[in-house]
Image (tube, rainbow, N blue to C red):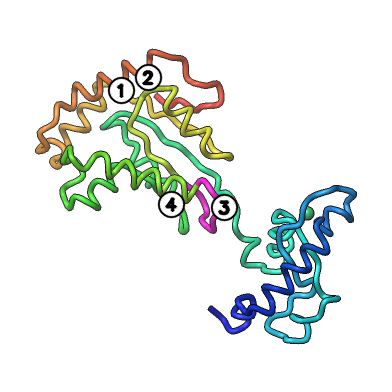
């Protein structure tokens, strides 16, 4: 904690700010805009940056609600302003449809890729096509945690989410989680998907019935109509 942040921990300040809010129960900024909102914090009108006289000067204080305070802080700190919700692209397809390659072809610096298989690989130490069943629940938890982080304001450029499910409702739910998101479906035909699996030595060695997985994805996807704003390739 920087020295001037410590000022807020002083009992004198806590007492002063508590009294100030009691005396000023409404948000000053909201009042200026003709709105009535309860104050939640005491703000220094001019950023004190550790300057004692500015810190303790009652004329430099105003009571604000949290939204007004956050807005003001963002304007004072350019670092804050850079935070925004990153545009998000959700890329869906069955195994062998080329989702990984497709995302790789779009990546730029400061982009983020959220991919279930990579998380599996990370925590199991196994090859990405070998997925110890007991770890599934934890991989899922980690993925949800990462999704939560990047559905909020951040400094990243673009978020890519790789999805291996074909269930239209699940894809839609993911899209709803991210404000500015688009969906691209790689509806690669089953034969090509299977050929890609066979041609990948790593996949070929994994004890998995790829054909069954590919069929499953296409069955799921064909059950419902995709949303109108989705891009369906193939
Ligand atoms: Zn306010």
Categorize mark 2 by other alpha carbons within 10 Å: few (<14), some (14-19), many (20+).
many
Categorize mark 3 by other alpha carbons within 10 Å: few (<14), some (14-19), many (20+).
some
> Residue 112: which numbered mark, if any?
4
Secondary structure beneath dot 4 equals strand
Q: Please tell me which residue lies in front, 136 or 85.
A: 136
Pointer 3 residue Cβ closer than 8 Å to ligand 1: no
**C-alpha span from label 3 to label 4:** 13 Å
Q: Residue at x 14, y 42 (%)?
A: 202
The answer to which of marks 1 and 4 sits earlier in the sequence is: 4
> Residue 217: which numbered mark, if any?
1
Specify whether 102 is left or right of 175: left
Specify whether 4 is left or right of 147: right
Asked if the residue at tag 2 contacts the one at tag 3, i.e. Cβ–Cβ closer than 8 Å, the answer is: no
Q: Residue at x 48, y 27 (%)?
A: 172
Magenta includes 71? no
Q: Quadrant of the C terminus?
A: top left
Q: Please tell me which residue lies in front, 84 or 91.
A: 84
The answer to which of marks 3 and 4 sits earlier in the sequence is: 4
**Prevailing secondary structure class for the magenta stretch in the rendered image:** loop
**C-alpha span from label 1 to label 3:** 32 Å
Specify whether 94 is left or right of 66: left
Asked if the residue at tag 4 contacts the one at tag 3, i.e. Cβ–Cβ closer than 8 Å, the answer is: no
Secondary structure beneath dot 1 equals helix
The residue that label 3 is drawn on is: 153
């Amino acid at each position: 904690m920087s020295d001037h942040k410590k000022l807020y921990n002083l009992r004198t300040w806590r007492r002063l700010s508590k009294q100030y809010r009691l005396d000023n129960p409404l948000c000053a900024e909201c009042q200026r805009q003709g709105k009535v909102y309860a104050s939640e914090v005491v703000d220094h009108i001019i950023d004190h940056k550790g300057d004692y006289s500015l810190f303790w000067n009652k004329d430099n204080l105003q009571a604000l609600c949290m939204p007004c305070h956050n807005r003001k802080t963002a304007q004072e700190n350019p670092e804050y302003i850079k935070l925004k919700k990153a545009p998000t692209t959700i890329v869906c397809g069955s195994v062998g449809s080329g989702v990984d390659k497709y995302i790789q072809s779009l990546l730029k610096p400061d982009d983020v890729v959220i991919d279930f298989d990579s998380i599996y690989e990370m925590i199991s130490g196994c090859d990405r096509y070998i997925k110890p069943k007991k770890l599934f629940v934890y991989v899922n938890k980690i993925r949800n945690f990462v999704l939560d982080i990047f559905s909020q304001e951040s400094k990243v450029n673009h978020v890519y989410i790789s999805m291996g499910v074909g269930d239209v409702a699940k894809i839609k739910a993911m899209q709803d989680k991210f404000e500015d998101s688009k969906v691209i479906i790689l509806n690669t035909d089953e034969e090509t998907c299977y050929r890609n699996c066979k041609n990948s030595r790593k996949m070929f060695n994994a004890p998995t019935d790829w054909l069954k997985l590919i069929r499953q994805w296409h069955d799921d996807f064909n059950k419902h109509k995709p949303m109108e704003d989705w891009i369906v390739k193939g």
